[in-house]
């Protein structure tokens, strides 16, 4: 059961999707059922907020002052988001949802 947590799972056919097919920023095609799937927008929003909180917390702990803390938070923000996103991906994997048909056309692909 633990080994399955690191796999992507197609929300349409429930097959495991190899990581080489995965795209975080755009819908991608399930290699088994050929349906378009994507990472829900809420995942990105949650990770952005979590990354911001992480950056602010680290910045405050490191500098101990509000002024330098804001600067440090700004510097740490992007690495914080990247690190947290990686950590969450490794530990939890991505939850996927079926993408509405025609979405890829809306995105200009
Ligand atoms: Zn599928």
Image (spheres, rainbow, N blue to C red):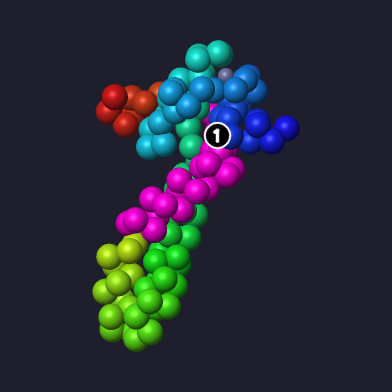
Q: Tell which of 28 and 2 is nearer to you.
A: 2
* Residue 11 visible here: yes
Q: What number of labels is visible?
A: 1
Q: Is residue 84 left or right of residue 109?
A: right
User: Residue at the right extreme?
Assistant: 1
Q: Is residue 99 depicted above or below 88 in this figure?
A: above
Residue at x 36%, y 26% (from the top left corner):
104
Q: Quadrant of ligand 1?
A: top right
At which x and y percent is residue 29?
Answer: 46, 20
Q: Tell which of 30 and 68 is nearer to you.
A: 68
Residue position for label 1: 96
Q: Tell which of 64 and 97 is nearer to you.
A: 64
Image quarter (top left, top right, bottom left or bottom right) of the N terminus? top right
Q: Is residue 8 left or right of residue 22?
A: right
Image quarter (top left, top right, bottom left or bottom right) of the C terminus? top left
**Magenta part of the chain:** 78-100
At which x and y percent is residue 98?
Answer: 54, 29
Locate residue 60: give its quadrant: bottom left
Residue at x 58%, y 34% (from the top left corner):
6
Residue at x 60%, y 23% (from the top left corner):
16
What secondary structure is marked by label 1? loop
């Amino acid at each position: 059961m633990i080994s399955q947590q690191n796999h992507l799972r197609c929300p349409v056919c429930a097959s495991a999707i190899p990581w080489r097919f995965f795209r975080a920023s755009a819908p991608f095609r399930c290699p088994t059922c050929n349906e378009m799937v994507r990472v829900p927008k809420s995942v990105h929003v949650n990770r952005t907020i979590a990354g911001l909180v992480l950056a602010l917390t680290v910045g405050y702990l490191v500098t101990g002052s509000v002024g330098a803390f804001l600067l440090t938070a700004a510097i740490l923000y992007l690495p914080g988001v990247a690190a947290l996103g990686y950590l969450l991906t490794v530990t939890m994997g991505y939850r996927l949802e079926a993408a509405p048909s025609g979405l890829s056309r809306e995105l200009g692909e």
